[in-house]
Image: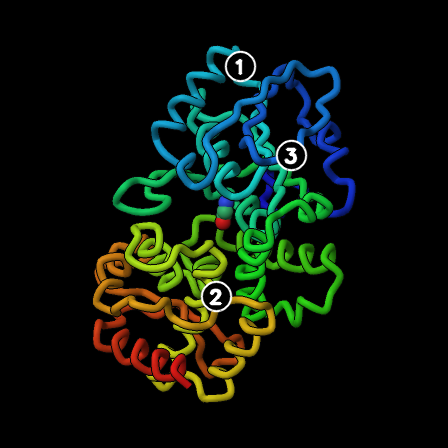
Amino acid sequence: MELGERSYPIIIGVGALARVRDFVPPGVAKVAVVTQKNIPHRPDLGELDSRIFTVPDGEDAKSMSVAAELAEGIAEFGLSRSDLVVAVGGGVVTDLAGFVASVYFRGIRYLNVATTLLAQVDAAIGGKTGVNLSAGKNLVGSFWQPSAVICDVSTLSTLNPREYRSGLGEMAKYEFLGSGRLDTEDLESAVARCAAIKADYVAVDEREGGRRALLNYGHTMGHAVEALGLAGRSERLYHGEAVAIGLVFAAHLAHTLGRIGNKELNAHYEVVERMGLPSRLPAGLDVEDTFSFLERDKKAMGSMTFVLGSGAVDGLEVVRGVGRDDVRRAWQEMREADAR
Ligand code: GLY
């Protein structure tokens, strides 16, 4: 990741977990390892004084109260300004631990050991950290880059199949960001290709003033159907499953707005279904239910904002001012396609 003096290595490969100690920055004496109970991997930190902090399972860990408890814990452990937090897990752990590292002593170093496919291709890279509020996901956070990201692809063999599939949802997104076909690659190369694309987008626009927002392709409706599932209004979806549905929805929206044709629309079904991801809107959900989430989406500035395809050579762009009727029409078109 090229970010001037905040540049860092992203290490991808079988056995990378054994190399964590090599990437601990100089001057570190104590390490707070933040992880979850169900994550069966522990880095070898050699002679360093380390303590493991186990946070609650699942998305529940991304809360202000868990962040406060973790900060109290690392203060009690005696972590100093020159010490290190090591996050070991998926996006929940890297977002939470990165957030606490960014505010503890107004910011100490942290290192991500990404153990899920989703974290390796997306969440552990890029420096956005944060926790959820009841009003929405990631509403409190910071930009705080890690010192290194370690992605040992052998840790992916212990993921449950749905969690693995969730990572494929983000991978599907990269196919629309120029990665080329990923499912025929060996896993290590596919992860490396996605990480490189993410790093390129972040390097040119760290704070998401422009181009980096294209990485949110599929995420606007994706977040809405994910949040509605979490609220018990429809089936519960993993993040990447929701992104897959969001990618297909974004294609229908672009199609009904006359921005893309049938060929591009069908390509979205082809990619998502080839990766074994859901391509239909959740049963029982009404488009009207989505507006409170779409209009609250952190990317929406006054009206709904989507990343949409276009006839342009480089494909995607951020489109502001999308109205409710546009969304209703696209929803209707997708429901009709679902029924076929
Ligand atoms: N931490 C995820 C990102 O920066 O996009």
Disc 1 residue crowd, few under 14, some 14–19, many 20+, Cα 10 Å: some
Amino acid type of the residue that numbered disc 2 sits on in the rendered structure: Ala
Which mark is first along the chain, 1 or 3? 3
Tag 3 secondary structure = loop
Residue at coordinates 54% horizontally, 28% vertically from top-left? Answer: 34
* CA separation in Å, label 3 and label 2: 28 Å
99 left or right of 161 in image:
left
255 left or right of 86 in image:
left
Amino acid type of the residue that numbered disc 1 sits on in the rendered structure: Ser
Amino acid type of the residue that numbered disc 3 sits on in the rendered structure: Pro
One can see residue 211 in this view: no
Asked whether disc 3 touches disc 1, contact meaning CB atoms under 8 Å apart, the reply is no
Residue at coordinates 39% horizontally, 79% vertically from top-left? Answer: 252
Residue 195 in picture, x, y percent from top left:
63, 54
Label drawn at residue 244 = 2
Asked whether disc 3 touches disc 2, contact meaning CB atoms under 8 Å apart, the reply is no
Q: Locate the C terminus by quadrant.
A: bottom left
Q: Would you name the residue on which mark 1 appears?
A: 80
From the viewer's perspective, is the residue at label 3 or at label 2 nearer? 3
* CA separation in Å, label 2 and label 1: 42 Å
Tag 1 secondary structure = loop
Disc 3 residue crowd, few under 14, some 14–19, many 20+, Cα 10 Å: few
Residue 206 drawn above or below residue 340: above
Label drawn at residue 40 = 3
Tag 2 secondary structure = helix
125 left or right of 57 in image:
right
